[in-house]
Image (cartoon, helix red, strand yellow):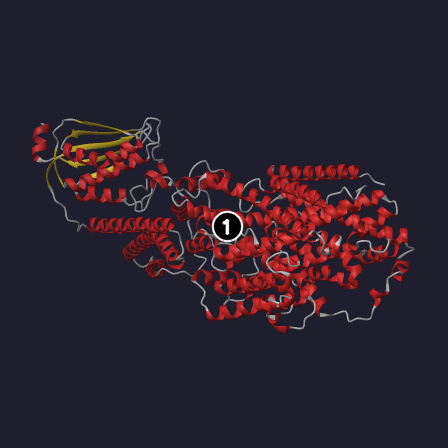
Amino acid sequence: MLSFNVLITICLIYVGILFAVAGWADARARAGSAKFLRSPIVYTLSLSVYCTAWTFYGAVGSAARNGLEFATIYLGPTLVFLAWWWVLRRLVRLGRRQRITSIADFISSRYGNSNIIAVIVTLLCVIGSTPYIALQLQSLTLSLGVFAEDTQTYMPGTAAFWAAVGLAFFTILFGTRNIDANERHHGVVSAIAVEAIVKLVALLSVGIFVVWGLANGPADILSRAPASMSTAEPLITPRWMTLTFLSATAIICLPRMFQVLVVENTAEEHLATASWAFPLYLFMLSLFVLPIAIGGLSFLPEGSNPDLFVVTLPLETGNFSLATLAFLGGFSSATSMVIVAAIALSTMVSNHIVLPLWIRANRERDPQSDDVRSLLLSARRISIVCILALGYLYYSLTDGTAALASIGLIAFLGVAQVLPALLGGLFWNNATRIGALAGILTGFAIWAYTLFLPSFEGQLILGQQALQTGPWDLTWLRPQSLFGSQIEDPLVHATVFSIGGNLLVFVVVSLITDPTPLERLQAVRMVHAQDSNPRFRSAGEATIEDLFILAQRILGRADATALFERFARTQNRQSGLPEYTDDLMRVLERELAGTVGAAAAHAMLAQVSGSEDLSFEDLFAMADETAEIMEYSQELEIRSRELAETAAKLREVNMRLTDISSQKDAFLSQVSHELRTPMTSIRSFSEIMRDNRGTPQKDQKRFASIIHDESVRLTHLLDEILDLSFLESGEAKLNIQDSELSEIVSRSLNSTSAMAEHRQITILTDIRPKSMRLVTDPNRLSQVLINLITNAIKYGTADTPIVKISARIRQSEVILNVKDNGPGIPPDTARIIFEKFSRVGQSADRGSAGLGLAIAREIMRNLGGSIQLQQSNEKGANFELRMPLSIAGKAAAE
């Protein structure tokens, strides 16, 4: 007889191997050499998390009790992967496109990022998964009990407790390393893949041993089948169809299956392999279920537990090594389910329950601070412990007496209540948040009343009296015979009423309610998802500056700058912003989603990039005008080429007209770009405030502040454009008078002193002689000086930044220099700095429309002076102003 302590030692060694595999996989993933870990084989094996103790032990028990009924456990998933693989493909594609982290996140995203739905689905999944976790603990304790030398001293409750503790430790160690929403748990997935191989090898080995070791081949073992297995009952019965339906829904609705199928998927192509490989895996796993069940009934004493035939058959015949392998197969089946389910559920609890509550209680804190990350990490770890504690509590309350397959079916039906909302959201435009919420709550309540609570056999809420005669002796409310129905099978009864009621309420409420704008947007994205992989439009429709400005408004300047600098480094750009890429767009959307939600983030970026039909009437009008001018310009060019040989003068006129049109076209193009940036932010945040009435007050204030700032910016831009237009046309009103230069400089310094102090920049003045009188407009000249000083301060990046203002008289002119020791202006840029909308560098700290120097040039021209950039070998930029002296100034100079 195999010693119980030896078995525990073997089990610990096996767990150590799993730890080593998980640790190795995580290390390889961090090193960027995890190509094999992202293979379709590993992905397919990870899907075997479906095959828990319910299939490893319970399928054999079901076959022994009910014959071929066990096949439904494998038939449902097989039908989904073979016939409904296109539904799975859509789930995987939308999950990757929408940055989905769980099934609750998926349903919430479809229905306008409704956190209420996310909370309800999370609670439903936790409650629905609790019986299933208890099932795994029960299977572990039952299989361990088989090896106990003294069954009187063996305590299943203690074994279940320590099993729960060990599973919690493993899950926390490898499932909660960080809080990246798109994290791939390579260590956990690799360990599950190893367990998938172990449980397949174990079940096949036991099957081969029974068929060719205990019996004389397949014919012999099948001839031993009891009469109860060969009764001529119809194969397709209501129970058969119900079991197949529940097994099929488990592939989509169970949190652990959604986790490995959608969240852990690293390439959509892997699903093509899994569509045939996973059904093949299930077929191999089910191949010997019936022979093992027949062997247990034939070779084991009467009264043996059918759920343990896989272990007891080799054990009772003295094949201890095979019994150990069978135990490890069952151990793998149970642990893989619990680990992945705990990861999925803890993510849902932390993201949709803990974090919203924390934000509501700490409105004044920065939502991107480190304490939030620490909170989420701690919340997930605590959630894992609580989830396993609930499973242990359910096991303790039910005394672990129910058949394993029955417990699994209870869990399947509970989680299946999200199916109408999930599939309806994928294929029905008119599905609404209220309809989905009402349907889920209705189905969940009926499931709990008709199946979940009765599983406690009168020990929780519903007593024995209520189970037998209905609450308050109302027989039509009997939990397992609602409205006097004659459906004898409790599972079929609960399925018909819960799923039927769920679907009915979902459809009716959706038809009588209207979706919100965000729901309509997400309906378009999900219901009408294209088969091709999503790609944002080209950079011609969304410049990198547009994206950077939007990122600053939502993420904050520091985080946005860090994100864009990281991408710039990956593109080997030492300074400035990165090139526009799809990878940048995907990462940016994920970061924005952490603040404003997945749907809102995608809508904002789509609006900026132009990939959505969200119009700005004013911008469209300007774009139409620009297009007309470009067309006219092209016509002039064609005609000028045709008439070039007839008259040189006409060619010169046409060329000039073409040049004027091009300049106007460029001007309008730049105006359109500069206006779109603040208007995009104004529209985006105003729509969010309009469509999300439940937005926290803190966020409303922040959005309103952004709208105000962008409005001020837009007004300032329009003022600058108007001012420049008057100056260029010579229609600007000037107040020419005899003025003192030192007073004008002093006034300009006063206006920029606060900015200089903030930037810790020293401004030096050297005006000789002190009295320089000019015939000028002092306000306009001060405007030019303020612009130059401000630019010098902005670009003051030296260790000891200094701005020096000096003036001297040469002949009848005053020459004023504004010089800094900053990075200077490259020669290729110096040629265009006085052009409209030209900027030096890419940093947002320079943030202006690029009209300041153009306005300064026109002011100096209108004042009869000039401005130019002096090139020298010295570091920094040196702008030189030349202005005529007044008569008094000339006399003083002489």
- Characterize the local packing of mark 1: few (<14), some (14-19) or many (20 or more) Cα atoms within 10 angstroms: some
Where residue 608 appears, as percent x and y from the top left, is: 41, 53
Q: Which residue is mark 1?
A: 353
Where residue 645 appears, as percent x and y from the top left, is: 34, 57
Where residue 367 appears, as percent x and y from the top left, is: 43, 44
Residue 649 falls in image quadrant: bottom left
Q: Residue at x 90, y 51 (%)?
A: 213
**On screen, residue 531 above or below 264:** below
Q: Residue at x 18, y 39 (%)?
A: 781
In this view, the residue in front, 159 or 499, is 159
Residue 282 falls in image quadrant: bottom right
In this view, the residue in front, 549 or 17, is 17
Residue 528 seen by the camera? no
Q: Quadrant of the C terminus?
A: top left
**On screen, residue 275 above or below 178:** below
**On screen, residue 176 above or below 678:** above
Residue 243 seen by the camera? yes
The amino acid sitting under disc 1 is: Ile
Q: Residue at x 61, y 36 (%)?
A: 31
| Left or right of 886 in this view: 407 | right
Where residue 601 appears, as percent x and y from the top left, is: 45, 52
Q: Quadrant of the N terminus?
A: top right
